[in-house]
Amino acid sequence: MIKHYVVFNLEQTNLDPSEGGTDLHKEPPISIKLAVDNHVSIIETSAHFFTYEGNVDAISGPFFSEHFDYQDFFTIAVESTGHESRLNRELEPQEEEIIKTVGATYLCECSGLGTPDIAGEMAELLIDKLGKNPYAMWKYAKHADAAYSLIMDWVRELGRGAAA
């Protein structure tokens, strides 16, 4: 017999996060930024936000200004992992938005910046998508985890290069 549970909060489980296996690897945010910089073209702009241009495979934004926002950068870094030369995600734009938000949440949490607020619009989009397919969250989580893992591989690669 197989038991199936839908759990939305850690408090609804008997899991103890202090027993290990649930903590994300802690990494300074600058290490994540430098690792992404080594794998994706960077274009400095005077804009106050970051964008990703898939056709030229470049992230543009305020890299060297007081307007640098790690949460915004992490969102766009996750988007860049979907490029055909990396994870080759071909999803609807709304699905990509969900994956970017979830992946950026992973990166914010692992870098000690804390969990970002998810805007009401994103919550509505997620509820709409899950209303049509309650199992879609696993798909989004899988893609977000793959993006997070790729970026963290870049961080480890950067660390090995610095140690050499």
Image (cartoon, helix red, strand yellow):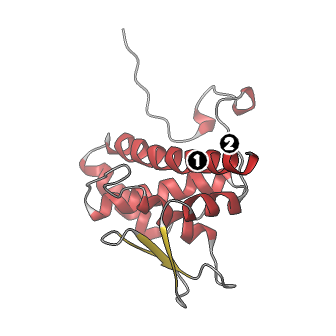
Q: Nearer the viewer, mark 2 or mark 1?
A: 1
Percent x, y of residue 143: 39, 46
Task: Evaluate if marks 2 and 1 touch, with contact meaning CB atoms under 8 Å apart.
Answer: yes
Amino acid at pointer 1: Met
Percent x, y of residue 26: 72, 47
Residue placed farthest to the top in the image? 1
As drawn, is 164 to the left or to the right of 102?
right
Percent x, y of residue 141: 43, 44
Q: Nearer the viewer, residue 122 or 23?
A: 23
**Residue occupying image coordinates x 37% and y 56%:** 82
Residue 98 position (above or below residue 44)? above
**What residue does disc 2 label?**
25
Residue 136 position (above or below residue 125)? above
**Disc 2/disc 1 C-alpha distance (Å):** 9 Å
**Residue occupying image coordinates x 46% and y 49%:** 147
Residue 65 position (above or below residue 156)? below
Amino acid at pointer 2: His
